[in-house]
Image (cartoon, rainbow, N blue to C red):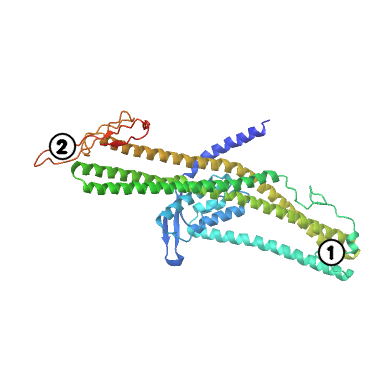
Amino acid sequence: LPTSEGRKRARSSKFRRFLHLRRSMSDILSVSNPEKIGDGIGAYTRYTVKNGETVVQRRFKDFQWLYEVLVQNYKGAIVPPAPEKTQFGKFEEAFLRSRCRSLSRFLRRIVLNSELAASQELHTFLTADETTFAVEKTLKRHAENPSVVADTTEQVGFWFSQTFSAAGSALSKGIKQVSGEATVEESNAAPVPDLVPGESADSPPWENDPDLLEFSKYEEFAHTLEAQLSNVARHATQILVRQREWAHALKATGEAFKGLSDVESDRTSAFYYDLSFKYEKSSGAGEGTGIRLMQAFVEPLQDAARFVKGIKVALQQRSAARKAASQAANRLKSRTNHFNRLRSAPDKIDRVQLAEAAVKEAEELLEQATESVRVITERLRENMTHFKLQYMEEIKTAIESYADLQVKMTRDMAGTWEEALGQLGGSGTGSSHAHPAAPTTAEARPALVTETLEAKGGDAAPAPAPALQPSVPDDDDELVDEGEDADFAV
């Protein structure tokens, strides 16, 4: 038989194949073309959701509905939260582009969950036209309310039955009985056997959680991961800010050299102008890289941190299910005690059948609550395995995107400045000259040569300025390392 570690590797390998398949399928999902509808306080944005050949129009609150209904109907599943709602700048172009990317990632994460991908709720969201979709939302909203009403009715009905039973017992015994609790005379009755499996008479029902250690680790993992991912996303945003500041500084330097070209004349002016162009070109490369960093690095990190909240919601649902099961167990004990007291009292035989029906109903409720805990526990455990692999893949993709962007920007800028070095190493500063490629080492790099245009009277040709040579260090000065820039003097 395979070991637990072997089964874990098999599950991981299977999920990796599933993840690859789902990722290829998720590529056809996209959210685009944000369009402002209406004016004033009632204005909203409508998005185009494309699923292969199917195209539908959805509002932002429709995405929120999808999240809420999946959380409600698939308790224990790690449902990726929808992007947060905002009231400021929500119609600005940059924000709308970012919102489209976040909504696309939201849908693709849902598709990566096999159970959620097969849900009727997602199918309705991706395929139904606006009218049908509005009807479906209304029907689901009404379908949820009767369960709440029925549960409330059951509780109120049980309260009335217990209250009237207690009142009747109080009148007959002269002592008020509250909610089916034993009277003084009946307190010495035989003890009721514990009907909750696995619980002792001394411990409250559902107090001991056999999976407590496992899910405590999940809770600690979610808390730590969210904090660390938020920290990484915050520092990644700082990288983006510095990137933009650096690009703006390059552009300002280029403009300064362009102003300097206006002071000079002829080839010196042309050289400064070409230099300003290279600074502006480098600035454009840095600015473009900053935009792509926001799309491929910063935003995915921010979404990953928000995705962790789905774990917390699922853990809270499991805790709520266990609490409901505990309440169901207590209700069964209370009704069973009441039934046994009625059965042992000859004058209450007329109410025994009602009490027995209440016990059977409590048993069914406890069975349902126990099954709910089991389903939520198994679903959450499976989702946690998938989540760890999925978020690792997303972080890996974000880091790869960052590295690729940095390499591309560095290569582009290296080409630009190698060209500048070639011009600096040529015989003149004019941009119209053909210049050799810049050497790659400091030893082979030619000394910087400049020319000044000083008229020697009349129509005399300008005399070249002496070449700039490296300054010779004093005896007590340290020599400049090979990799550092040397100081130049005329």
Return the residue nearer the eye: 407 or 83. Answer: 407
Label pair 1/2, CB-CB below 8 angstroms: no
The relative height of residue 6 versus residue 379 in the rendered view (above or below) is above
Disc 2 on helix, strand or loop? loop
Tell me the quarter of the image containing the N terminus.
top right
Q: Can residue 186 be spotted in the picture? A: yes
Q: Residue at x 56, y 61 (%)?
A: 138
**Is residue 55 at least partly visible in the picture?**
no
- Side (left or right) of 429 relative to 318: left
Residue annotated with mark 2? 463
User: Is 302 situated left or right of 372 in this image?
Assistant: left
Point out the residue furthest to the front here. 476
Q: Amino acid at mark 1?
A: Arg
Q: CA distance from mark 1 to mark 2?
A: 123 Å
Q: Nearer the viewer, residue 409 or 435?
A: 435
State whether residue 296 is above or below residue 183: above
Closer mark to the observer between disc 1 and disc 2 = 2
User: Closer to the N terminus: mark 1 or mark 2?
Assistant: 1
**Residue 389 sits above or below residue 34 on the image:** above
Q: Is residue 274 above or below residue 5?
A: below
In this view, the residue in front, 207 or 57, is 207
Amino acid type at image mark 2: Ala
In the rendered image, residue 120, in percent from the top left (x then y), is placed at 56, 51
Horizontally, residue 95 falls left or right of residue 387, namely left
Which corner quadrant of the image does residue 68 belong to?
A: bottom right
Residue at the extreme left: 458
Question: Is 35 in front, or is 352?
Answer: 35
Mark 1 highlights which residue?
351
In the displayed structure image, the side of residue 214 where residue 167 appears, left or right? right
